Amino acid sequence: MAMLVLEGEVCLCALLFPFLCPSLVDAQQYFLPLKWPRECGPREFFSSTEFICRPCGAGQQRAANGLSCICKPGYRLFRDYGGANITCSACNTGEAVTQDGWDCIQCGAMNSSTKILSNGKCACHNANEILVERTQNGKLLNQAGCQLCDAMPMAYTWPNSERNLCAKCGSSFIISAKSCDCSDLTVADGLCFSSSASVDARIDFPLLSLPIAVTSSWFAEHLLGARLACQNFRNTTACQALGNMCVMAMGSLRATSGPCQILLHIGTSSTGSHTNNIPTWPVGLPWIYYNHPTLPGDTRPILEAMALPNTFSTWDTQKRRLHIVLAKYDIQGNFLGYGKADGGKLQLCSDTASRIDSAYIFGTTYRQMCSISISVLQSHFPEPTFFEPFLEFEQNGQLHLYALPVLNLNLHDSFGTFINQGSDRRRWVLMRRFLLVDAVGGLGVPSSHLLRFVSSLSIFVTLVPGETLGRIFPPLLSLRYSEIDLETAGSDSMVQVSFSVDYSMKQGENQRQTDIALAVLGSLAVLHALQKTVSWRRRQGLHLLDLPSVVNFLIFFAGLLANVFFLVAFGTGLYWLIFYKNQQQVTVLLPSEQEEMSFVIYVSCALGLKFLQILHLLIFQTSVDIFFLDWERPRDAAEILAETSQTSMSEGARAKSTISIWRTYFVANEWIELQTIRKLSPALHILLTIFFLQVIGFENLALREPTPSLLPPLDTDAACWSRILRFGVCTSVWIVLGFLQIGLHSLCYERFIEDKIRQFVDLCSMSNVSVLIFSHCNFGYYIHGRSVHGRGDASIDEMYTNLKKEEENRCSCRGLLPNADVQTFEVATSINMRRRFEAINQTPAVVVPARLNGQALGVVEQNIQSYHIMNRFLSAFIDHAYKDMDYIVRDKTTLEKVLDMEIQEPLDKSLFYNDPRHSFSRVLCYGHSSTLLLFEMLLFCVVDLASQDLVLAAVITYFMQAVQPCVENIVLAGSSVC
């Protein structure tokens, strides 16, 4: 009974255990001990289904792979169900195991000496014997024996590689040795030759940190055989293998007995014809060199002599791709067939299929760069594959292939000079065959492991100039190889590789037109700078040529030359943007990145010169003299006593204090606020520019892809930007938005909302304060602010009454002349008037400390006295009180307005020119909005061209705009304001 109870409790616990301890159950189900196959014993194998070591059965041992068992020597197979499920049976003493391992047999029959090897199998002593264990119908013999193969004529047999069959000898043995025995002759690469030759099995690796020449084990094993087989028998595979070795040696002619020299020697010694009448392509030999390597000559006839019949279109899907075909060979020289270059055949970087294949969209400049590990290169290219490129085209309904030249930049001549890296095309040696990765040629004797790979592969396509069909010259493949020592670098090292496709056309005519435009506009800029200098000298009152005149001429010329550079650059960008993006047959191509450097220089020069103009503008603003003329007159005695009865000032000071200075201060403060106003909002302008360029997608028009699209397809993601197109797009958007802002500001905002310039003139009239601005010694601007009501210091009732009179035309006009409304004038002063102004204005302005002492107060009183004298002088001058310093008011002639200069000099009388356009804004930023707009645009574009980052360009430009008001305030502090 107790036993039954105990058994019941155990069963209950077993049933409840999975629910009470689920974690332990899971651990028992999924926990496995880690066991490596190499940790298994000599009589154990690793079970790939259980991941543990299992013992082999009786008479068995572990197989070489460690994953199964085989019979021990002296044991035969009895059953074999695959893997470790075998049964072995021991052979009797003196018996050996047959070659297939299923039977036991005695050695020694057919009068041939046999022996039992350590593996328990029979073997023959002589090299020309085969082992015979069964009859022809498969019946096992009683004893194994050796059969002699007949190596003499009429038979020419020799044991095969398994030594179980007499096979026919190779042709080289029959021809050279007249038998299958080549022991007295030369055996190379499994072939028999009657003559011997010397070869150089070294490969140069000149790009390593320590340049070396490696004795390649591949060359040592196969070069002699390939040479003799190609030279003596014209063996196609051997000749192709010899050509491959020449490519592995980078086409170098440095080694006199290297593969390239050997191939050239075989070709020159051949008396046969040439394939397709090409001198460097002898019949039966591979075409390795496009032109003769020892006498290269000019390559322009190869690259630019014939235009291919292909026509390319941006709209036809069949005609908008480069159909490059590759002939492929393995390292042994076997032809692997043709294949398209699509699908990344020439690209080591991996990417999506659409991005990779976009490299062959015609007209699209393509860039691809990545880092790739050496282990990936070794795994993908355990042996090199060799390519010969062709361009597929159709003519008369038939498909043809055009052989494309290859420029190996690592090719060096017999002196070790990299002749293909120079710009002299007469020294170039063009090849036909190339490889991507070579992990075999650098395996040296005794123990070196060097890897050579294509670090840069570029395809250059040149458009035929002056045609409307969109034809091209033969494309050129340019390759640059890099080398790395795997013994020091390791297989996990990363290397940089790149792939690119560049399109170009001769830009000589375009460059000539650009030079003509620069010359013509530059000449006009010189003339305009001379005219501005003459105008400046007139306004300064100068008569002799001096250094300031020369400096100002250079500064004027710099600003105008900046405009010239900008106009040429903008016209160039707009031209390419219109004609490149709006073509169906591809007839024009963008300048290359190297040719764009002159364009970048133009834009950079424009920015630098425009910056000089901005600095000159700031210096110009510091030299401006401004005087605020107060027309207000003292009130009567009763009002003065009522207002000043509580003061402690002297009677003279009390009389002067009856005219409030706060109106003048208020006008001066408003003038200061006018310094930084613009006709557009800089921050809004930048935001709108970024919105249209990046959000709307106008930036995508700058891609080096002839199809115009704001949202380009995914297969053009790898296309790169054109600096010319980028400048054209950015400037077009910037200028259009700028003109729109200025137009809306002038036509709408100033007319219906607020016009600060006109408001300032109205404020002067309301304050009874005029403003005289001297921008030059003898030239300036005058704002007539004399109140038509005779008083500006009025109560609110008086002010309302005065405004009502003006509204109802019950008072005179505000203008300087009777019945005239013009309040702003350009002033050309006479010499006498300017001298008198300077004499009064000799006292320098001082900064009054917070607590005035007697000495400081005396200086301030002197300044106050000078102010009153100047105020009285200018009031009298405006009222024609001085006959020797009078003035006349007139309009500028059309010529004067166009040239912006005064033809008539003010000798005796000053000249006041009516200026309803408010030209006094020229001393403000408001009057230089176009100059500032152009400077900021050039800054934005230069930063973008340098970084190709619109956001960074916007941030830097906005920072410059934010700093500008601070600079303006500093500049204003240096100007003379009275």
Image (spheres, rainbow, N blue to C red):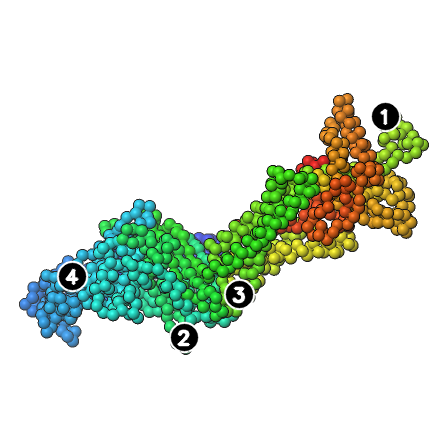
Q: Which residue is mark 3?
A: 707
Image quarter of the N terminus? bottom left
Question: Horizontal and vertical percent for residue 154?
Answer: 10, 74
Report the mark closest to the observer, 3 or 4.
3
Q: Are marks 2 and 1 in contact (CB under 8 Å)?
A: no
Residue 560 percent location from the top left of the image: 61, 49
Q: Which mark is residue 746?
A: none
Q: Say whether disc 2 or disc 1 marks the residue closer to the N-terminus.
A: 2
Callout 4: few (<14), some (14-19), or many (20+) C-alpha neighbours within 10 Å? some
- Of callouts 3 and 4, the N-terminal one: 4
Residue that carries the numbered disc 2 in the rendered image? 395
Where does label 1 land, which residue? 649
User: What's the CA distance linking mark 3 and mark 4?
Assistant: 62 Å
Question: Looking at the rendering, which quadrant does residue 296 occupy?
Answer: bottom left
| Label 3, residues with CA under 10 Å away: few <14, some 14-19, many ≥20 | some
Residue at 52% across, 64% down: 706
Q: Nearer the viewer, residue 140 or 873?
A: 873
- CA separation in Å, label 2 and label 4: 49 Å
User: Which residue type carries mark 4?
Assistant: Val
Q: Badge 2, how many Cα within 10 Å: few under 14, some, many 20+?
A: few
Residue at image coords 55%, 58%: 572
Residue at image point 77% right, 25% down: 857
User: Which residue is at 57% across, 59% downward?
Assistant: 574
Secondary element type, mark 3: loop
Badge 1 amino acid: Met
Percent x, y of residue 977: 74, 36
N-terminal of the two: label 4 or label 1? 4
User: Which badge, 1 or 3, comes first in the chain's sequence?
Assistant: 1
Rendered image: mark on residue 187 = 4
- CA gap between label 4 and label 1 equals 127 Å
Residue 454 position in % (x across, y down) = 37, 56
